[in-house]
Image: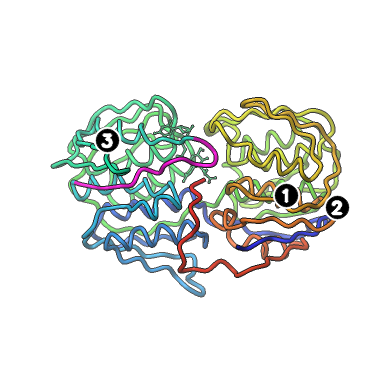
Amino acid sequence: MDKLVIRGGEALLGTVRVSGAKNAALPCMAAALLTDEPVILENIPQVRDIETTRRLLAAMGAEVELGYGRAQHRTTIHCKTLAAPEASYELVKTMRASTLVLGPLVARCGHARVSLPGGCAIGARPIDMHIKGLESLGAKITQNHGYVEATTNRLKGAEVFFDKITVTGTEDLLMAATLADGETVLHNCAREPEVTDLADLLNKMGAKISGAGTSTIRVAGVAKLHGARHRIIPDRVEAGTFIIAGAMTGGDLNIAGCNPAHLGALLDKLAAVGVKTKQSGDTVRVMGDVPLHACDMTTEEYPGFPTDMQAQFMALATQAEGVSVITENIFENRFMHAQELVRMGANIKIDGPHATVRGKTPLSAAAVLASDLRASASLVLAALVADGETIIDRVYHIDRGYENIEEKLRGVGAQIRRIGEMFPRKTAAPATNA
Ligand code: EPZ
């Protein structure tokens, strides 16, 4: 298994470029299932979850061409025919976002068989609201042997109410509703930029969607969708991770190719901590070695503070003077990184959904274990300021959502290297889910 070795103490200087958003690319790739014409996606991040999605779609009969060389961030997906509208357990267990194919498959093929994702490191994460929503559109759904089977002659437009805001639930139903007979109104939707990006692609494919980015989305179903070309939005979580890296190392770092408008809650919170940033165009600059003050934070749905930045914020809070109380509202088990940070000398107490971080505490290098994607990012951040050489194990987690993280960080002065085999492209990823 690959490990990352990081010697702390370097201030990060220069410019780091953000890749396309994993959490926009995945639903956009699934959307290609809705048409028998080619869909061309640009600014696709080169991360493991994209590779897993390529294999998922190819297993159904789709032609998926991942670009190479200068075109490495472009993919062309052509779902001319879908012989096997199925997502196997083997693939779903490695990436729960595979369930995003359920809605498009039943809408396009009239039937779909998708493995239930099972448990996850950060929480139970059921897909009951995906299922309830599709049933509202008239799909007949059965569950057996760990699989969901959905059938319909044609989905029918309807009112769908999400009991809780769900990002992929909104995306799944949005895709299904595009080919339904009649109008669908989705209520209590997720407003994440990734949802809006998917709706932009679907409208380019001929869908009739309005209200994406708000809590109520209207979809006038159409008989058929066509091909399209679409550029994926920048990854706001990767951008946020680098902004915190700049702040923690006291560097002078430009995070380029991002969309500052998607980072509102994060930049607001960082300002309260004392982090100095400046925005210009698609770049956020983090400036200088400034004193960091403790600050409470609660994760919320967009436009609130993103749960995918909670672990990284906790690493920052270990370097802030005072007591920060972090409250995780979205997932019930998303503090796995806390004990690893404590191993590095942090002072963190967990009490249910609350983590109390006392800072500033000097961190010392240690061997630590990544438990999920964003937890591994927080360990990288802590290692960048720790005294000595930290070894982070199980970095296959970070490869799922960060493109070439060690090269990007080395490019701005970090002492970081990977030991073990550079992530093999064709082998199955270990079961991780989160
Ligand atoms: C998406 O996951 C993201 N993944 C997650 O990012 C992100 O943490 C999450 O949204 C919240 O922002 C992708 O976009 C691929 P949810 P998703 O459905 O859609 C409960 C990362 O690090 N729920 O919005 O699976 C659920 O258990 C990943 O990149 C139900 O109860 O999250 C959770 O408590 C991790 N029933 C809450 O809702 C359902 O049917 C929000 O989950 C669906 C969700």
Front residue of this view, candidates 120 and 185: 120
Q: Calculate the distance from the C-alpha at mark 3 to the C-alpha at mark 2.
A: 52 Å
Check if mark 3's residue and mark 2's residue have beta carbons within 8 Å: no
Helix, strand or loop at mark 3: helix
For residue 52, the mark is: none
Name the image quarter holding the N terminus.
bottom right
User: Residue 205 in magenta?
Assistant: no
Residue at image point 27% right, 27% down: 159
Residue at image point 37% right, 27% down: 162
Residue bearing the label numbered 1: 381
Q: Residue furthest front?
A: 145
Helix, strand or loop at mark 2: loop
**x%, y% of residue 102?**
30, 45
In the image, 158: left or right of 210? left
**x%, y% of residue 290?**
85, 42
Give the residue type that dot 2 points to: Asp
How would you rate the neighbour count of disc 3 (Cα within 10 Å): few for under 14, some for 14-19, many for 20 or more?
Answer: many
Q: Which residues are magenta?
A: 111-123
Give the residue type that dot 1 points to: Leu
Front residue of this view, candidates 33 and 343: 343
**x%, y% of residue 142?**
23, 37
In terms of sequence position, does the residue under pointer 2 or pointer 1 come before the other?
1
Residue bearing the label numbered 2: 387
User: Residue 117 in magenta?
Assistant: yes
In the image, 9: left or right of 337? right
Give the residue type that dot 3 points to: Leu
